Image (cartoon, rainbow, N blue to C red):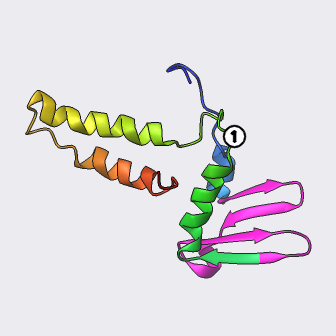
C-alpha cells in the first residue's frame, strides 16, 4: 500500500450511526439497546444469533484473517513490527521523556487481532 492510497471504510457514516451493516438478507449490528455494550447480533430471514463476551473480539480477529492478503484494511504482523520500530526509536534516540504508552497501547490492541507468529 502506498502512503497516499485511500482505504475504503468498512461502514458509511450512516451505518456507523445506526450501528449496523446489511448485506442482502443479512444484518450485522451492535445490539446495545437490548443487551448493553459488547453485544453483536447477526440476523438472517431464518436465523438470529446474539454474540457477546469473548466471542466478539474473536469474531474481529477472524474477520481480519478472512480479508484477502492484498486488502489494505488487513492488519498484518508487519504493522505490529512498524509500531515496534517506532517504540524502539525512543530508546535509540534518547527520547526518554517521550511518552510511548499510547503507541504501545495501540500496538497491543492491534496485535490482539492477529494470529500468533
Please tell me which residue is depicted at 59% across the width and 72% down the height of the picture.
55
Please tell me which residue is depicted at 54% across the width and 77% down the height of the picture.
53
Give the percent coordinates (x, y) of residue 65: 63, 51
Residue that mark 1 sits on: 68
Query: Quick check: 85 above or below 16?
Result: above
Please tell me which residue is depicted at 25% across the width and 39% down the height of the picture.
87
**20 in the magenta segment:** yes
SS at mark 1 in the image: loop
Q: Quadrant of residue 83?
A: top left
Q: Residue furthest front?
A: 117
- Of residue 45 and residue 92, the one placed in the foreground of this image is 92
Give the percent coordinates (x, y) of residue 68: 69, 40
Query: Quick check: 61 above or below 103?
Result: below
Please tell me which residue is depicted at 30% across the width and 44% down the height of the picture.
103
Residue bounds of the magenta highlight: 19-48
**8 in the magenta segment:** no
Assess disc 1: are there few (<14), some (14-19) or many (≥20) residues with their C-alpha within 10 Å of its C-alpha: few
- Of residue 111 and residue 46, the one placed in the foreground of this image is 111
Give the percent coordinates (x, y) of residue 57: 54, 65
- Could you tell whether 19 is left or right of 24 in the image? left
- Of residue 11 and residue 115, the one placed in the foreground of this image is 115
Of the 4 image quadrants, the one containing the N terminus is top right
Q: Quadrant of residue 29?
A: bottom right
Q: Residue furthest bottom?
A: 35
Give the percent coordinates (x, y) of residue 20: 70, 59
- Could you tell whether 107 is left or right of 101 in the image? right
Marks counted in the figure total 1
Amino acid at each position: 500500500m502506498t502512503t497516499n492510497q485511500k482505504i475504503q471504510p468498512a461502514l458509511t457514516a450512516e451505518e456507523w450511526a445506526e450501528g449496523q451493516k446489511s448485506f442482502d438478507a443479512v444484518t450485522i449490528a451492535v445490539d446495545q439497546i437490548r443487551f448493553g455494550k459488547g453485544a453483536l447480533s447477526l440476523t438472517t430471514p431464518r436465523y438470529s444469533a446474539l454474540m457477546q463476551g469473548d466471542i466478539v473480539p474473536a469474531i474481529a480477529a477472524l474477520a481480519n484473517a478472512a480479508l484477502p492478503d492484498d486488502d489494505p484494511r488487513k492488519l498484518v504482523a508487519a504493522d505490529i513490527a512498524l509500531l515496534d520500530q517506532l517504540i524502539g526509536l525512543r530508546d535509540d534516540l534518547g527520547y526518554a521523556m517521550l511518552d510511548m504508552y499510547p503507541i504501545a497501547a495501540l500496538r497491543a490492541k492491534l496485535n490482539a487481532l492477529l494470529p500468533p507468529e
